[in-house]
């Protein structure tokens, strides 16, 4: 009976931490969405809101990290239970970094607006990348919420596409600058934005890899997509 009570308490503690991670995920997803929207609409106030929320994300990361450390110290989880806790510690690190990158996008937006250097032709070329990264984060968070690997392969494949888009946009922005020096300021800012988007994609990929580790018990960080597909079939 005592062991059953301990397990129930452990499960309650674990679910409480999961709820906080999901809350952090929701905030970070909103941050990214608002950072993108602030850039699209050239909205300084929305960009400033994104920057303010970064502190909220940082506080949550510290809070959840402490909860996980206490849970490990108090309950000494093993096997799948320990993997679950370690996954959440890793995921909040990735979420915090996504929040940081969204804040960088918001700061770039403010600089673009303040310097009046918005150039629609340059900007429209990264629209596809914006959409891809937002979808990746949504699918990664869905995978965590459900502890389901169904969408993980799609995220990993999308990451390859985002990496290729990143390289393509960088080449394009360099071409703009070489052909017309007046575009240099805007191009440099968009390079910062594009790099942040690429990093957000990487962190979304990391989240899905953490979910696979928890569900399957296999570390797939250095596995090919073909190998991961085979692992998920088992």
Image (tube, rainbow, N blue to C red):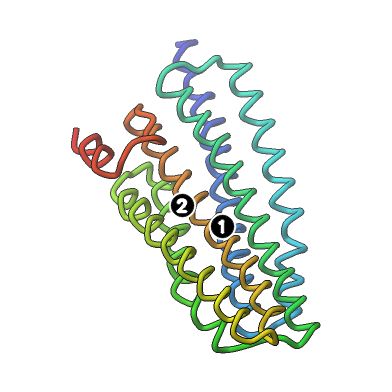
Q: Secondary structure at mark 2?
A: helix
Residue at the limit of the structure toward the top, as seen here: 2
Judging by the rendered image, the residue that carries numbered circle 1 is 26
Q: Position of residue 17 (x, y in %)?
A: 57, 37
With 146 as the anchor, is 203 left or right in this view?
right
Residue at point 53%, 32% (across, down): 14
Compared with residue 8, is residue 34 higher up or lower down, i.e. above or below?
below
Image location of residue 155, percent across then percent down: 37, 54
N-term mark: 2 or 1: 1
In the shown orientation, is residue 72 left or right of residue 230? right
Q: In the picture, which quadrant includes the C terminus?
A: top left
At x 48%, y 22%, the residue is: 82
Q: Nearer the viewer, residue 137 or 221?
A: 221
Task: Name the residue nearer the viewer: 194 or 214.
Answer: 194
Could you tell me how far apart the alpha carbons at marks 2 and 1 are, in whole angstroms?
Answer: 9 Å
- Res 141 label: 2
User: Disc 1 on helix, strand or loop?
Assistant: helix
């Amino acid at each position: 009976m005592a062991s059953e009570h301990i397990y129930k308490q452990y499960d309650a503690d674990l679910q409480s931490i999961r709820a906080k991670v999901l809350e952090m995920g929701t905030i970070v997803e909103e941050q990214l969405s608002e950072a993108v929207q602030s850039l699209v609409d050239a909205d300084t106030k929305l960009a400033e809101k994104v920057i303010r929320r970064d502190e909220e994300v940082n506080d949550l990361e510290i809070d959840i990290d402490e909860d996980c450390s206490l849970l490990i110290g108090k309950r000494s989880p093993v096997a799948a239970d320990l993997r679950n806790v370690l996954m959440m510690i890793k995921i909040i690190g990735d979420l915090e970094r996504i929040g940081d990158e969204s804040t960088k996008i918001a700061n770039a937006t403010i600089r673009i607006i303040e310097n009046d250097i918005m150039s629609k032709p340059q900007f429209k070329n990264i629209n596809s990348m914006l959409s891809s990264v937002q979808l990746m984060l949504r699918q990664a968070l869905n995978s965590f919420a459900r502890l389901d690997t169904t969408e993980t392969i799609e995220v990993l494949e999308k990451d390859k596409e985002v990496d290729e888009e990143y390289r393509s946009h960088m080449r394009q922005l360099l071409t703009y600058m070489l052909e017309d020096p007046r575009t240099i300021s805007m191009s440099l800012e968009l390079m910062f934005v594009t790099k942040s988007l690429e990093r957000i994609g990487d962190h979304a990929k990391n989240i899905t890899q953490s979910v696979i580790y928890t569900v399957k018990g296999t570390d797939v960080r250095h596995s090919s997509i073909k190998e991961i597909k085979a692992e998920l079939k088992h």
